[in-house]
Structures are given as structure tokens and as C-alpha cells.
Amino acid sequence: MAAEGGGKEMNEIKTQFTTREGVYKLLTHSEYSRPNRVPFNSQGSNPVKVSFVNVNDQSGNGDRICFNVGRELYFYIYKGVRKAADLSKPIDKRIYKGTQPTCHDFNPLTATAESVSLLVGFSAGQVQLIDPIKKETSKLFNEERLIDKTRVTCVRWVPGSESLFLVAHSSGSMYLYNVENTCGTTAPHYQLLKQGENYAVHTCKSKSARNPLLRWTVGEGALNEFAFSPDGKFLACASQDGFLRVFGFDAAELHGTMKSYFGGLLCVCWSPDGRYIVAGGEDDLVTVWSFSDCRVIARGHGHKSWVSVVAFDHCTTSVEDGDPPAEFSGSDEEFHEQVHFGAGRDRANSSHSRLSKRNSTDSRPVSVTYRFGSVGQDTQLCLWDITEDILFPHLPLSRTRTHTNVMGAASPPATGQTTTTTVSTIPTPTTTTTTTTTTNPSGTNGKDNVSNSSSSGNTANSLPSTLPRSNSLPHSSNPAGGSTPNSHTVSNSSTATTKGNSIIDSAFIATGVSKFATLSLHDSRKERHEKDHKRNHSMGHISSKSSDKLNQLSSTRTVKADAAKTLGTMLCPRMDEVPLLEPLVCKKIAHERLTVLIFLEDCLVTACQEGFVCTWARPGKVVSDRPHEDTVM
């Protein structure tokens, strides 16, 4: 839980923080930035982003890091907690003219010590495929901006593919590319392939194979981020219209939606087992959405401004047998005496096997905890735990195991379903979750309580109203009143169309690689400028170019109307209808807005808009007796 001090203490930049696992420490010598280490003037520039890849180097130092700062792109060997960063020797450095890199992604399937495939998206709409080890530029996509003229907001390789990748733009469109195909010399012509509620998928009409293979049009306004489920079968999209939409990727079918409490959604991520999705955005909240039930199961309030990144910690997400330990509130020495790391704990990759053993006759149910983190424009890092009292609200609650505080009983499962059967019928640990968010028509902040809170459900499950309200807001026991039309069982959702019968199969044919291309297109100054925000709403990473402004203005009335319809429904429950989480940790860790949060095996990585990429060692990972490692404290 966040402990707020006053004045000087509140504005102090933290270099360590403590959780139940121990102390996380900032490794100051493992900081990556531009070689001169001078803070970058971030006004008007795109967010700093970081990508990692492991090249399976025989020396055991196979991690590589890529990050963009302004017009520059850097590629280094990442030494993590082992050794100090050597910024004088980047493997590759590129400076672009007329456009800025906005996002990037490595292909883990093709990465070797001699070659990596890195996709880079740009503010003018192009996508470049480069090899920073060979220092080659193999291809430029959308070079003439005939496909889309707006900023690239997210680029990802399609999981399991060496040639397919997906690109999202601030226009609200996504495009599927094949690296083997050319983009053509004329604007593409499209034919409708599939259409649904607020989305459409078109295929490119062409006599010969060309890019894009498919065009997705999703929602209204910019598509800020998308994320593939762990099994690659589902796609979660966070849009500026405030909706989280989850699609079956191959069949292009909408699985479920969620609406933010207020404003646009900026970020989205999946739990390691694909059961839950977390989204964050302009309502200053993190929202947890159940993939199988297609409903919001919790919200988290800790940030004071827009949430820019959410990410699950696959190393701390755990499953334990029997009763969980009581909440700990002692010294570090007492903590280590009580907790033995690894005892009775399985990591995320084995969580499914433990969960699948659970059935209605179990007398000692497993204890489940999902850990995720968030960073925001308020320069704060928050860590959160989703515990069994949130996931299985109808079961007898065991003692609280973390500082994540919840008051009241969560809403019971839909009619005819029990949590036990929901867990046991999930066929694979890669089933995914979707989140959708709702815009608040009254313009109130996401942390405000909504006045019209009905408790028309089964009040027997609700805690008395006289309980203290310091840790969370109360909520009604059954706001949903049963299942909804868009609520699907996991068994149905898991029968997604296989790649053999997918819409992708009819959309592409491999062709030769085009000639070397370079970025030469110039953005107008007007398109590169970003909105000015007040300090508490520091520079957002949503595009505010002139074209984006037109899109946002044209959809304002529609969004407000939708918000009035969705607030208080399964799409967007009221604040008192779902549990409200408080963070385990809430610390100010930077001077400028945070734009990156990545969990690695022995550390977590953050980055701020000044261009500093920081490494935080996990508890016990920076010790002097580790073999073959030079310790940096």
C-alpha cells in the first residue's frame, strides 16, 4: 500500500522499495541512455520505448536491448544486473531525419548472435525492417505513405511467424504485413472480408501478392496499443474511444469488450496464462478483465495521472497449496525468517498444471496470486497483486496474503457457473483475457465514487456498511445480475479457428524482397507537435497530430453517448460494483513521465521520457557470491 508523505519526502526519487519478496534496488551503474548521459528534452517527442531479445549467445550474455530517444535509435548488449553498462560501445546507432521512431519489436524466432530482425515504426507512418547486428536495412514498408499517413502506435511480430507482422496506427487501423511482399506503387484497394460491432476487416484486392494482406478498422479514434495472447490466438486492442476489444485473431471474431471508466485506453497486457487482461489509460485506473467471463473483476487506484504502461510479472505470479501466509508487516529480517523462496511455489509457466488439479471436491484449494505493475505520467511505479479473494469471490476467504486491499464481496459468477468449474475447464494456460473501458460522461476523475450505487443483488455476500472504508470502496454483490449476451465460456472461446482455416491464408502469397530503401519523407512541423498538458496530465503518448485531432473531435459526441449507455453495465461497472485495489508499492522513481515497464527474470526495467533506461534488481539477485558475475550495487 502506498504511504504518502508530505512535501520534500513526497517528491523524493526512490532508489529502492520493499515487497513481501524483499528489496528491489536500482542499479545506478546499469543505466542505459544516450552515450553522453544528458537528459533528453522530451517536449514534442515520441515516448521512449524499449525492446529486448535474447540471441542465445554461447557466452551466456545473450540479451540485447533497443531503445529510441527522439530521432535516435540505439542497440546495445544488455548486461542487466551482471555488469555496468558501457554506453561508449553501442552495437548500432541510427539518427533519422524528417521522422522519429515511435515503437519497435524483435522477432525472437529468427534471432541469432549474428543476425536479428527488428521492426521499427515511425511518426510519419512508415515501418522499417533492420538488422542492427549486420547494420543492414532490408526493407521499408509504407514508404510513400499510400497505406496509412498517420503515426505508428504499435508494431508486433505475429507470434510463431518469421514473416508476418501487425502494425497499428493513430488512424484507428491495423495492417497485417508479410516481409516477403512489396507494398505496391499505388494506394491499395480493399474488399470487405468481415464486419462486426465497431470493427471491420478488409482484404487487399490485387492481382499479385502485395502488402497489406489485411486491414483492420477498430473503434473510433487512435488504436493506442494491442497485445497478442500468450498462445497467439487472441488479440487485445486498447483504443482512444475507451474500449478494450478482444478478437480471435485468425477468425477475426470479437470475443468480448470492456469500456474505460473515463477517457481513452492507452495500454494493455495479458496474464502469463491468458486468463486475465489488464488495461490502463486516462481514467488513472488499472482495470482487470476476465477473459472467460468477459467482465471487469477489479479496478486499481494508485496513480495520479494517466497510466502509460501495464505489465504482468511472470516470475512473481504464483500458485500455492493450502492456506496462504498472513499479511506480513515486520522487518526484513523477520520477513526472511518466515518466507523461504521457492518453497511450495510454482512460477507462472506451471500455474496451469496446479490450477487444473483443482475441482469441486478439493478440501484445500490452491492459492493464486497474479502480480502486475504499472507506470504512469505521474512518474510513479505501482505494483499490484490479484489474489484469490478477487478471482474466486464465492469461496471462503483465507487470510489476506498481500497489501492489495479489497473491501466487500466481489460479484458472484454468472448463473449456472461456479469458479471451480471455470478454472478446471480451462483447457490451456494460454487462454486469453479481454478488457474494455468506459468513458465517464460527467467528466469526473476515475478515482471518484459514483453516487448511484445500487445493491439490488444478494446482499448476504456484502460486508456491513459500517466497516472502515480506508482501503477500498464498497461495491454491490451482484451488479451484473447473471450472464450477458457477450459472455462466453472458456470451452467455446478456446475453439478458435486454426491457422489452417484462418482469414490470413487467403490474404497473402510470398514474393521477393524489394530493394534497399531509406526514410526520406518529411513530416510537417505541425504534425510533430504534441498537446500541452498541465503538470498532473503530463505529455500523453497519444498522438495529437492534426489528423488525429479531427478523428477525436468527430467522435466526441458518439463517445459521450456511448458512455452514458455503458456506465453501470457489464462493459463498465460503477466504481462501487467491483473491488477497488490499492497498490502494494507506489513510488516516484523518475523526474519525467514513465513510458516503459518490463519484467525480466532477475530484474525489472523502467524508462522515462528523459531517455534513461533503469534496471531494478530483484531481491537476492545482486549478491557477491554469484559465480561468473561482476556485481554492481
Image (cartoon, rainbow, N blue to C red):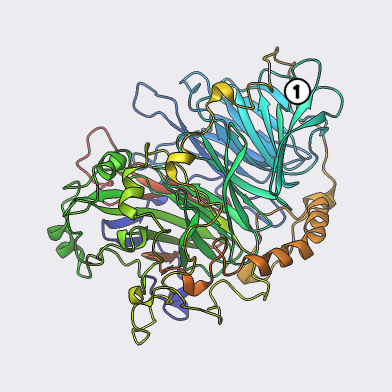
State whether residue 146 is above or below residue 386. Answer: above
Residue nearest the observer in this picture, 244 or 376: 244
Residue nearest the observer in this picture, 530 or 153: 153
Which residue corresponds to mark 1? 517
Q: Mark 1 falls on what kind of element? A: loop
Q: Residue at x 43, y 40 (%)?
A: 491
- Please identify the residue farthest to the left as the structure is shown: 337
Residue 455 image position (x, y, % from top left): 46, 78
State whether residue 85 is above or below residue 591. Answer: above
Q: Residue at x 67, y 17 (%)?
A: 180
Identity, as a three-letter code, of the amino acid under mark 1? Ala
- Please identify the residue farthest to the right as the structure is shown: 186
Q: Residues within 10 Å of mark 1 (few under 14, many from 20)?
A: some
State whether residue 346 is above or below residue 594. Answer: above
Using residue 153 as the reference point, say whether residue 591 is left or right of it: left
Using residue 264 as the reference point, say whether residue 392 is left or right of it: left
Can you see residue 353?
yes
State which quadrant residue 17 falls in: bottom left
State which quadrant residue 120 falls in: top right
Residue 494 image position (x, y, % from top left): 46, 37
Residue nearest the observer in this picture, 302 or 241: 241
- Please identify the residue farthest to the bottom as the structure is shown: 466
Q: How many labels does the image show?
A: 1
Residue 202 image position (x, y, % from top left): 74, 33
Can you see residue 609?
no
State whether residue 167 is above or below residue 482. Answer: above
Residue nearest the observer in this picture, 3 or 159: 159
- Please identify the residue farthest to the top as the structure is shown: 512
Which quarter of the rendered picture does the N terminus lie within?
A: bottom left
Residue 130 image position (x, y, % from top left): 63, 26
